Amino acid sequence: MTRAIIIAAFLVLAACGEAEQSTSMESAPCTDASRACVTEAAMSYIEALWAGDGANARLHPSVRRTHNGGDNAEDGAEAIQATFAGEGIAAHKNLRLVVYEAKGDVFALWIVEGPERSAHVAERIRVAEGLVTEIEVFVVLDDRPFTEIPEHWPTDSENLSNHGCGDPVRACLYDVANSYLDALVAADGSDVKFAPNVRRTQNGGRVQEGEDELRASVSRERLAFRRNFRLFADEEAGQVMALWVTGHDLPDAKFTAHVIERLRIEDGLISEIGVFYPRDMGTLEGVSGWPDEAP
């Protein structure tokens, strides 16, 4: 009898140990470079922002974050986590994710209700070994009440498209995207690979539709320069993110613009463009705070 009790107790303890180990393994943060893992790490940061509590954000000790250019930089996990409580995010909606698996970049685009005004937010979040190492934030304020801001693009983290590109997919996506991005600099929209029903939104407000309207708009551009140009491709979803610094030097307006654009490519043509460009007024010397990168 005593021996049977001892054996039973041993089996119970062994089972508990296995269950505890299994639970520990299931709850351990991922560290690989998969699409799922980098997205999970990026979302730990975004959800911490929403909660106003940085404790669960998976930040690397030396993580760096910029806001609307490199003149506003924060360095270190502790410094960034300390800001979360003061974010004052009352509500959020329309989260969209674009993932560049080659370098572990997750782009998050969403609309937020802040303590004083609403805003459109676009962030580049780089993940390495399960931790966020870089955060590049673009914020454009919106005077409309949060509930009245329309969701111009569907809330869908995948929303896969038929991009129509053969191998190498990334090079093809960049080629299509550059037909538009280079045309902006040249102020010539005649050869852009637009879909007939292409649609573009600017800073969450202005909406332009149809290739004729977009070609005419591109041809009216008067950009003073383009620098710090960077491209990132979500090959699975057929989307390209373009980040760059430009500016206008006009008699009545001089400014640097920090640009982030999302382009969706379907059947080899650009069907969607969502662009944000917060500005540094009165100067052409604004910088992104991040190095140029080869795609």
Image: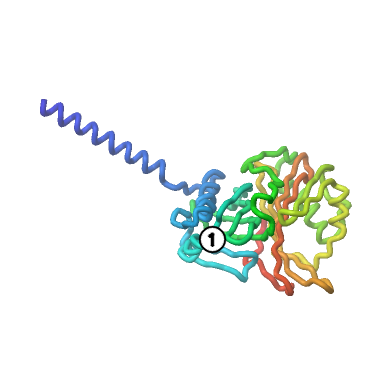
The residue at 52%/51% (across/down) is 47
Per the image, label 1 sits on a secondary structure element best described as loop
Q: Residue 54: where, in percent of width, then height?
A: 47, 57
What residue is shown with label 1?
87
Residue 135, by quadrant, is: bottom right
Residue type highlighted by circle 1 = Glu
Q: How many marks?
A: 1
Q: Residue 244: where, in percent of width, then height?
A: 71, 61
Q: Residue 242: where, in percent of width, then height?
A: 70, 55
Q: Is residue 170 left or right of residue 270?
A: left
User: Quick check: 151 above or below 117?
Assistant: above
User: Quick check: 14 above or below 232?
Assistant: above
User: Quick check: 73 above or below 265?
Assistant: below
Residue 229 visible? The answer is: no
The residue at 28%/36% (across/down) is 16
Q: Residue 80: where, in percent of width, then height?
A: 50, 63
Residue 123 visible? The answer is: yes
Label 1 crowd (10 A; few <14 / some 14-19 / many >=20) = some
Toward the viewer: 20 or 54? 54
The residue at 61%/51% (across/down) is 108
Quadrant, the N terminus: top left
Toward the viewer: 108 or 184? 108
Quadrant, the C terminus: bottom right
Point out the residue furthest to the top here: 1
